[in-house]
Amino acid sequence: MKRVALTAELIEQIERIPFCAFLDERGRHYLLEKVQVVEIPPNKLLLKKGTFGEELFAILAGEVRVWERLDEEVKEYARLGKDQIFGEMSAIMHTPRSANVSTVTDVVLLVLLKQHIAELLKINPSFREFLGELGLHREQENLDLGF
């Protein structure tokens, strides 16, 4: 995992992530101050099913796959790409990861830690609306996929 410096281009990409629409100027400034951006090569395990995590990830570039091993078979549930978010359920609700997530291609990720999510909620109460909607959507997706 290689940490990446924030450039004007990366800042523009970050500001296009859907949850940024729920942040005011102060919230966006805090996000850019606290966020980490990392590059990860293909075929790397990012999240392991059953573990707990304290990070929310947003994909700035590349593709990841959501999967699990069932006996001898690997079941792929989804592929996620640019501007999509994962890891939020464990970070926000302190629940175990519901699946594995691995990189498919070179990936650039925004990484937001749990304590920074909590601070963003204080700075921007409307951010809670986004997280609530995302949580409901993710729960429905998980039910549909049989998690």
Image (cartoon, grey):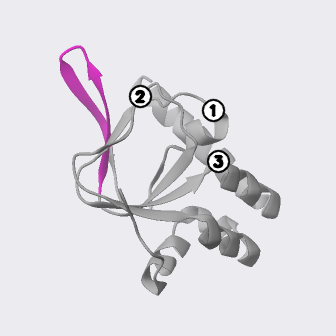
Which badge, 2 or 3, comes first in the chain's sequence? Answer: 2
- 73 in the magenta segment: yes
Q: Residues within 10 Å of mark 1 (few under 14, many from 20)?
A: few
- 65 in the magenta segment: yes
Residues 18 and 67: in front is 67
| Residue ID for mark 3 | 114
| Residue ID for mark 2 | 49
Would residue 96 appear left or right of 47 to someone viewing this image? Answer: right
Q: At 57% from the left edge and 64% from the top edge, which residue is drawn? A: 35
Q: At 69% from the left edge and 70% from the top edge, which residue is drawn? A: 30
Q: Picture quarter containing residue 66?
A: top left
Looking at numbered disc 2 in the image, what kind of residue is underneath it? Answer: Lys
Q: CA distance from mark 2 to mark 3?
A: 18 Å
| Residue ID for mark 1 | 94
- Outermost residue toward the left? 72
x, y (%) of residue 76?
27, 34
Asked if one can make out residue 31 in the rendered structure from this viewpoint, the answer is: yes
Looking at numbered disc 1 in the image, what kind of residue is underneath it? Answer: His
Secondary structure, mark 3, is helix
Does the residue at mark 2 contact the one at mark 3 (Cβ under 8 Å)? no
Q: At 50% from the left edge and 43% from the top edge, which residue is drawn? A: 87
Asked if one can make out residue 129 in the rendered structure from this viewpoint, the answer is: no
Main SS class of the magenta portion in the image: strand
Secondary structure, mark 2, is loop
Q: How many marks?
A: 3
The residues colored magenta run: 63-78
